[in-house]
Image: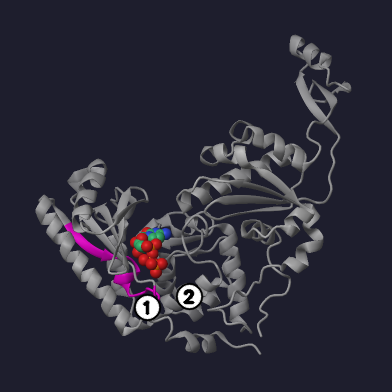
Amino acid sequence: MKNSLKIWVEKHELDVTPSREEVVKVHNVAKKMVKRCEDAIKETSAKARVILGGSYAHGTWLPGKGDVDIFLALDKSIGKEGLPKIGLKIASIALSGYDVIMRYAEHPYLESFVDGIRVNIVPCLESKPGEWVSAADRSPHHTEYLVSRLNDDMKLHVRLLKKFLQAQGLYGAEIKVRGFSGYVCEVLIVKYGDIFRVVEEASRWKPSSVISVEPYNLKVEGFAILDPVDTRRNLARAISVEKLTEFIFLCRIVREGTKCDPFTSPLLQPASFEEIRPLLDKVVVLYFKHNERKEDTLWGELYKSSKKLVYHLEKDGFSVLNYSVSADNVHAAVAFLTPGEVKLNLLRRVGPEVYREKETFEFIDDKRNLGWFFSDEMRSRRIEARKLCSVEDALAEYMEKPVESVGFSKGLASEASKTWKLLKGREIERSKDEVIRQVVRNIFGYSRIFDQCG
Ligand code: CTP
């Protein structure tokens, strides 16, 4: 039986709300760390203000996800150059005695766990709206804006929206996901009021829709969700078009009522291994080791490298119906779905323009030339036997020198070129490696039947 979104929401109102105990625990850490930051500012005699930000300050965090984001707004005169040095000094004094990890966004910040709660201390510059110098400078303004706009009911609906997106694999701005950030959820609730209207409206979003809470006076090209504190900034740019499209589609399903609980079960189920087994001989998997690296870096490099491989395969005459990537801490894999057993034996190479005498003679004289003719562009062309007859041949050739041949990312290339192997059909079927199974499941996307529960 299908249930309306209202029924599902009633079921989850309580479990998206952090318990009293958890709230007290996170509050205590926040209070302690604000005090430590203020003391550290005094100690360094810097001119700075401590501001709580992110989902903690907005009251929009999900149970078990209470992070404390602290922004150190330094005097603007410090400038972008002085920001990391002074900001990190204050942050490290504030975190002394705790294990600290240096993280990087546009500039570095510090992360630590205090009494089991993740704390981020992010330096930024005190800026007037629109006069930002670093990307983090907007954050305190986001907090000011959201605190004045979100009432308790709206906060609940931000949390519901986050939980829905999480269950559907669409939550998170990190490169691996390229989905909806917490801030985008907050802005959507400010715009539409509750999750019901978000679903209703998003189900009708068009490629030209511009979602803006505040008036804006710039011409906007294409789909946009404008940042209310800076309407020149399009928050949707960080969301991949695929994830955005999936969200619109899912909102249509949820609008009509679902059998599955949209807050806990993915409505689109991946194709099962049973369904895809007969098609495995159309898949080639490139599997390699990588040096452990930051997740954002790894996924950025993987996406870039796989895109380049596909571009070159297509340039070399092979069609790729779909491709996907997957990785764990040690291995990465790229899968390519081909139309079937494709053997390409000949290729046509375009030669120089005929007025280039020497080059034209050389082109014709080449040993590989099996026959040649002139084209309507006043060039010679020749037919030759291919060296790369299949997708596997081509990938093997590219992986000899992956950076030079296809522009594979440098960070992945050295390990990949030493460890790569190709898997097909039965080898894929026999493999128990989750990276391989995942990449192959991804390539077939979703099962034709969706919203199937119980
Ligand atoms: N931020 C932003 N643009 C984004 C994502 C984040 O400007 N696309 C800024 C916002 O000021 C936001 C802050 O970074 O309030 C913290 O965001 P983040 O740590 O990504 O997540 P939260 O909003 O705290 O959400 P949660 O922890 O619940 O996932």
- Sequence-wise, the earlier of marks 1 and 2 is 1
Mark 2, residue position: 163
Q: Magenta segment range? A: 49-64
Q: Position of 78 compared to 300: left or right?
A: left
Residue in the picture at 50% in, 81% down? 196
- Residue farthest top in this picture: 358
Q: Which amino acid does label 2 sit on?
A: Lys
- Ligand 1's quadrant is bottom left
Q: Can residue 272 be seen in this view?
A: yes
Q: Is residue 441 magenta?
A: no
- Depicted 90 relative to depicted 343: above or below: below
- Residue farthest right in this picture: 371
Mark 1, residue position: 155
Ligand 1 neighbours mark 1 (CB distance < 8 Å): no
Residue in the picture at 18% in, 54% down? 93
Q: Position of 395 compared to 104: left or right?
A: right
User: What is the x, y in percent for residue 56?
Assistant: 31, 71
User: Could you tell me which secondary element the residue under label 1 belongs to?
Assistant: helix
User: Could you tell me which secondary element the residue under label 2 belongs to?
Assistant: helix
Dot 1: within a 10 Å radius of its alpha carbon, few (fewer than 14), some, or many (20 or more) residues?
many
Residue 308: which quarter of the image? Answer: top right
